[in-house]
Amino acid sequence: MLRDLTDKVAWITGAGTGIGEGGAVALAEAGMHVVLSGRREDKLQQVAERCSGRASIEVLDVADQTAVSAVAERIIEKFGRIDVLLASAGINVKDRNWHNLSVADWDSVIRIDLDGAFYCCKAVLPTMKAQREGLIINISSWAGKHVSVVTGPAYTAAKHAMNAMNESINMEACSYGVRACAMCPGEVATPILDNRPIPVPDEERARMVQAEDCGEVIRFLAQLPNHVCINDLTISPTWNRGYVAGARAQIPQPD
């Protein structure tokens, strides 16, 4: 039986756009109070307006460990608990491959995509362990399981590391009732696609997984009973561009 999420508390990073936005709206619709974090307050305000009065805003750069700790402390002081952490903040850069990836851009991707998620997990774990329950959803990627030139070495390394970090939470915190899921989406039609070196056509974006689809999955994960842990979950478009390209190169295609 799926559990009731009414009045439980979720903290969402990267909540201003994309998967974070989709997750925030879906969790608010399920009755949770959602705390929206991201770097752009105007985007967070727009998402909050979609959350039926169940949202509050904490502007945050997850690469700032001191700021992450301060936000977590304010949430706990206000609500007394954090039931779900949705760590969705993430970036990629346009110049992302070995021939053009700068050290500064490598550092930026690792600081936000990996270190930022670690800072957030570290900040909520003591409270979740004291509660004897809690769910962490780390938004990883298809790139966390499959190495590809499409995403580049920085993003790929960050997401592979996130998956390992996520499972270490389950190993060490499961006896406290805390569980973590690495959600690994394939191509999702979110603004991060705008940084692709080769632009993605609108007709192909329309065939991808949408942010709202990810929101539905996030809500399902949050509604699962506390004794159920989905360690990792892969979600991808049925019309998978990587698969389609590979098939076209190797297999005769139907008319």
Image (spheres, rainbow, N blue to C red):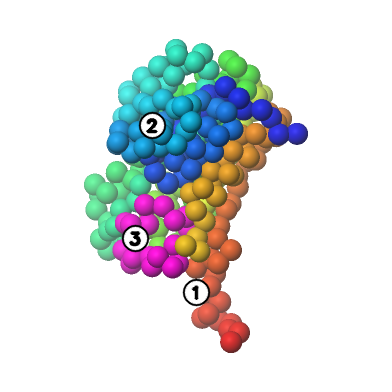
> For this rendering, which residue is in front, 248 or 75?
75
Of the pair 237 and 216, the residue shown nearer to us: 216
Residue to which mark 3 is pinned: 196
Mark 2 and mark 1: Cα distance apart in space: 37 Å
> Tags 2 and 1 in contact by the CB under 8 Å rule?
no
Specify start and end residues of the magenta stretch as a single range: 186-205
Which of pointers 2 and 3 indicates the residue nearer the eye? 2
Viewer-proximal residue, 241 or 166? 241
Q: Residue at x 51, y 13 (%)?
A: 80
Between discs 1 and 3, the one toward the N terminus: 3
Left or right? Give the position of 78 relative to 229.
left
How many angstroms separate mark 1 from mark 3 (CA)?
A: 17 Å
Q: Vertical placement of 42 versus 213: above or below? A: above
Residue 119, relative to residue 112: is it above or below?
Answer: above
Q: Which residue is mark 2?
A: 37
User: Which quarter of the picture shows residue 254?
Assistant: bottom right
The Cα–Cα distance between marks 2 and 3, rounded to whole angstroms, is 25 Å
Q: Which residue is mark 1?
A: 245
SS of the residue under disc 3: loop
Whole-percent x, y for residue 133 in the image: 62, 23
Residue appearing at x 53%, y 43% in the figure: 215
Please tell me which of labels 2 and 3 falls first in the chain. 2
Going by the numbered disc 1, the residue's amino acid type is Ala
Amino acid marked by disc 3: Arg
Q: Residues within 10 Å of mark 1 (few under 14, many from 20)?
A: few
Disc sitting over residue 9 in the figure: none
The residue carrying pointer 2 sits among few (fewer than 14), some (14 to 19) or many (20 or more) residues within 10 Å by Cα, namely many
| SS category of the residue bearing label 1 | helix
Which residue is nearer to you in this view: 234 or 77?
77
Question: Nearer the observer, disc 2 or disc 1?
Answer: 2
